[in-house]
Amino acid sequence: MTKDGVIKLAKDNKVKFVKLWFTDLLGFAKSFSITVDELEGALNEGMGFDGSSIQGFARIDESDMVAKPDPSTFTIIPWRPTDNAVVARMFCDIYEPDGTPYKGDSRYVLKRNLQIAKDMGFTFNIGPELEYFYFKSDQGTEILDRGGYFDLTTLDEAMDLRRETILTLESMGIKVEYSHHEVAPSQHEIDLRYTDALSMGDNTITYRIVVKEVARKYGVYATFMPKPMFGVNGSGMHVHQSLFKGNKNAFFDGKDKYYLSDIAKRYIAGLLRHAKEITLVTSQWVNSYKRLVPGYEAPVYISWARRNRSTLVRVPLYKPGKEKATRIEYRSPDPACNPYLAFAVMLRAGLAGIQNNYTLPEPIEEDVYEMTGERRKELKIDSLPGSLHEAIEYAESSNLVKDTLGNHVFEKLIENKKIEWDRFRTHVSQYEVETYLPVL
């Protein structure tokens, strides 16, 4: 889409307002609106705004920022009025006033790391599976149904919500593979068809907004909180990923017993070796570590396999030997992460494996959850960080994470997460009151 193409499309669709979208450090969507009369100027020069109140952006004494919309992301927002005030949206890249990319822009962080992959001859494709819950409101966890995995019954009251969500996504140019009820009551999943990582970063942000907007229309609440309810599965974001060289899947080798190339094996080895370091980015909240515990299908142990879903990395076997379908699945991220940063650290961990010729251990085709501690030790199976505090410590000492994020984002993220941990560890919970107050 060219600038002139965007202007024509806006005119043909009688667009009145254009929302300019970007994200803060934590992946929360930010937006401001311009009238269509300002669109040409925005495309040519960008729109200035104050970045001092955006999480992870500039200090108040250096707060002037410029948001420049990406023409390829123009689309009509279907849930806004379409009679006399059609609204469109565009994702923006953030710049300094002197025209240099702003180092605190999450989208820029991903673009910079994709360039590293490009310089190695690769394009990076992503296909995430995002899970979420529907509740009666945002004031509690009253469920809509008691359905289970893949249920096709009247228990699944959210079928119409999922259907409208998919239709909305597809009207915005986002392709969906399939949707279904997930394991926990009132838990659902819509899987996006794979595309290049930058587009998928934008699509993931859009997906989260669309899910919430459709839920709001039906008078309910959708949440991507990793673990909103005790005793049932939390919500993950399993990230299917592959590297391509032109039209060829660099992960595929038809002669290998696993159909995996040496590049794929070293990529997996990189993810495994750097898993602890990148977990702060892929699971960034205190609540994320309530999900990453044994017994609820969330990966805890650092290992890989083909069919085994108890491992951190899985190689799906839906279409064995088919080149285009060959990919790896990284299972620990949750849907509340910043997708641009999460995709960037996964990519760089994998590329480190390729660049440094990491050796991939044998796959673990046993149920890791059921293993004794001695058996896991024997197989040298390590664990992901058990808390946000542990994840901060691993990330803070990681050259890979620092180089991936850049100094600005790295330092702001560590600072933000330390504040979150301090607030959590000093909070007195209802559990503590109920457990200790009567006896101490």
Image (cartoon, rainbow, N blue to C red):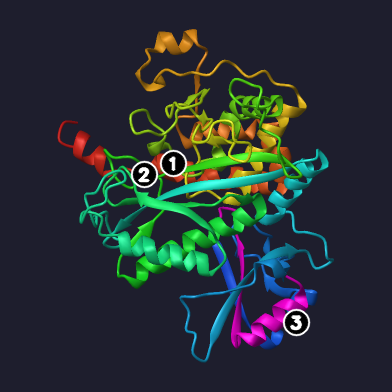
Label 1 belongs to which residue?
A: 288
Q: Residue at x 48, y 64 (%)?
A: 209
> Where, quadrant-wise, is the C terminus in this rendering?
top left
**x, y (%) of residue 203?**
57, 58
The image quarter containing residue 394 is: top right
Q: Could you say whether the residue bearing mark 1 is in a helix, strand or loop?
A: helix
- Using the numbered discs, state the Cα–Cα distance from disc 2 to disc 1 in whole angstroms: 7 Å
> Where, quadrant-wise, is the N terminus in this rendering?
bottom right
Label 3 belongs to which residue?
A: 40
Q: Which residues are magenta?
A: 1-28
Q: Residue at x 66, y 87 (%)?
A: 11
Inspect the image, locate mark 2, and give the three-letter code of the amino acid beneath it.
Lys
Q: Give whichever of discs 3 and 1 has the lower sequence position.
A: 3
- Using the numbered discs, state the Cα–Cα distance from disc 3 to disc 1 in whole angstroms: 42 Å
Q: Is residue 207 magenta?
A: no
Q: Is residue 302 left or right of residue 348?
A: left
Q: Nearer the viewer, mark 3 or mark 1?
A: 3
Q: Is residue 393 left or right of residue 121?
A: left
Instruction: Verify CB contact (< 8 Å) between mark 2 and mark 1.
Output: yes
Number of residues whose C-alpha sits closer than 10 Å to that of mark 2, classed few (under 14), some (14–19) or many (20 or more): many
For residue 200, above or below residue 231: below
Q: Residue at x 26, y 38 (%)?
A: 231
Number of residues whose C-alpha sits closer than 10 Å to that of mark 1, classed few (under 14), some (14–19) or many (20 or more): many
Q: Give whichever of discs 2 and 1 has the lower sequence position.
A: 2
Label 2 belongs to which residue?
A: 227
